[in-house]
Image: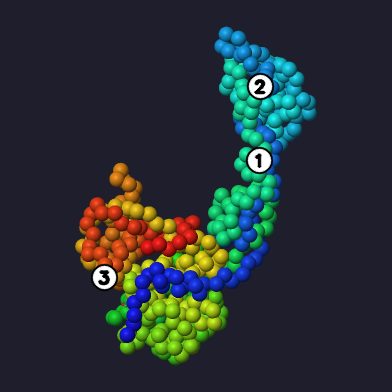
Amino acid sequence: MRKPIPVAKAVELVMEHAQPIGVEKIALEHTYGRILAEPITAKHDVPPFDRSPYDGFAVRSADTYGASGDNRIAFNVIGEIGAGHVATQEIGEGEAYRIMTGAPIPKNADAVVMLEQTVERPDNFTLRKPFTSGENISFQGEDAKDGEMLIEKGAFIHPGTTALLATFGYAEVQVAKRPIASILSTGTELLRVDEELAPGKIRNSNGPMIAAQLTRMGIDYKSYGMLEDNLDACTEMVEKALAETDILITTGGVSVGDYDYLPAIYERLGAKVLFNKVAMRPGSVTTVAVLDGKLLFGLSGNPSACFTGFELFTRPAILRMMGAEKPYMPRMKAVLGEDFTKPNPFTRFVRAVWEMTEKGPVAVPAGFNKSSAVSSIARGNCIIVLPSGTRGFGAGMEVDVLLLGAEQGVSDWVL
Ligand code: AMP
Ligand code: MG
């Protein structure tokens, strides 16, 4: 008899066994999608000097006092500072430098007059309002102060992170290593994608789907193809895949049918089964085992269950192995767009499509919703979560929604 455990407990068990696999230093240009293994601390002030945020004129604010429409004040232009250049003189009373965006403020100047606020003549310009000290200046360190802690280790590296790393001269970055996954699809009924249908057979959709789910995460994998339901052959292949990779994902063969051999394989290999039944639909047979510190994900063969099992358990485990501090799918509240009348003895994960409307985010189930469904996983862009013990939901009710494919996750699993 299998005893179902709550989803949150299953996630916790998996995460307890997902161990980071080390760090490495790589070139900045290869860091997109990796996890920082060192914090980013400011190595200098940003900006590193007071600079002009506009094209205009650098002036001494005191010289602008009293300016008005009736009393335009004129300034002599003593030179020009383009971005990347430094002024050669200090400015004196009634003097100004023409200055471009990004150029350092010259000595004695304490305000910048935008070009649009002046009337220009060949060697001078006039303005019609007073400026305060500091007006239109980007101050040294206003963005980040030397030594300031900016991004914690364990953060996902996205293009904005890359910009910050580049700012401080990180040509190489210490990141967490990524695990290499293995994928093995089991089932005597399975055909390759390029094979013609034959009686009793279906094409293997789970293998390519898992490969794509891994690719979306930037994870390399080795595919061990498809195997017929044969205990010896499957055991051998599982052993080989485990020896060659950091984490094994199998699909199919975890139920209680006559040819579901994964439980026997775990036993033969001496793997410790963390759970073999989860109080969820689809995917209640999802099984996770550990052998020599490596996780073995036994996902259901049913496509919707397989997909959901990966997103709920495998994905955060891989992210944790990669050192991520925020490995879980982001979530939000949405209004249910249509009735969902089935009762939910177990927590139900419904593939759905969410869209923003005047009423806020609305999520609609993506169609045929059995665990065997493949069409709804293709249509869905999110997963609606209906808690166990609820007796059906009506259109307009508020539901929790898990967002798929997000670059950045969240730090806790609360559903
Ligand atoms: P199993 O988990 O092996 O009991 O399989 C459950 C259901 O999923 C059965 O209808 C299988 O034919 C189907 N199935 C198993 N593996 C795959 C796969 N790789 N691709 C598509 N469907 C599959
Ligand atoms: Mg099977």
Residue 243: image location, x then y, percent? 55, 82
Residue most toward the right? 88
| Drawn side of residue 414 relative to residue 161, left or right | left
Work out whether residue 185 or residue 96 is closer to the camera in this orientation and state it: 96
The residue that mark 3 highlights is: 345
Q: Residues within 10 Å of mark 2 (few under 14, many from 20)?
A: many
Provide the residue designation for mark 2. 61
User: Closer to the N terminus: mark 1 or mark 2?
Assistant: 2
Residue found at x 62% / y 39%: 142
Q: Which residue occupies 73% across, 26% down?
A: 108
Q: Viewed as shown, does residue 241 lie left or right of 46?
A: left
- Classed neighbour count for the residue bearing mark 1: other residues with Cα under 10 Å, few (<14), some (14–19), many (≥20): some
Query: Which amino acid type is marked by label 2?
Result: Ser
Q: Secondary structure at mark 1?
A: loop
Q: Amino acid at mark 3?
A: Pro
Alpha carbon distance from label 3 to label 2: 72 Å
Q: Is mark 1 within 8 Å of ligand 1?
A: no
Residue designated by label 1: 141
* Image spot of residue 303 (x, y percent): 35, 71
Instruction: Tell me where residue 330 appears, x and y as whole percent.
Output: 43, 57
Q: Secondary structure at mark 3?
A: loop
- Which labelled disc corresponds to residue 41? none
- Decide which of tag 3 and tag 1 comes sooner along the chain: 1
- Name the quadrant containing residue 116: top right
Q: Is residue 243 above or below residue 311?
A: below
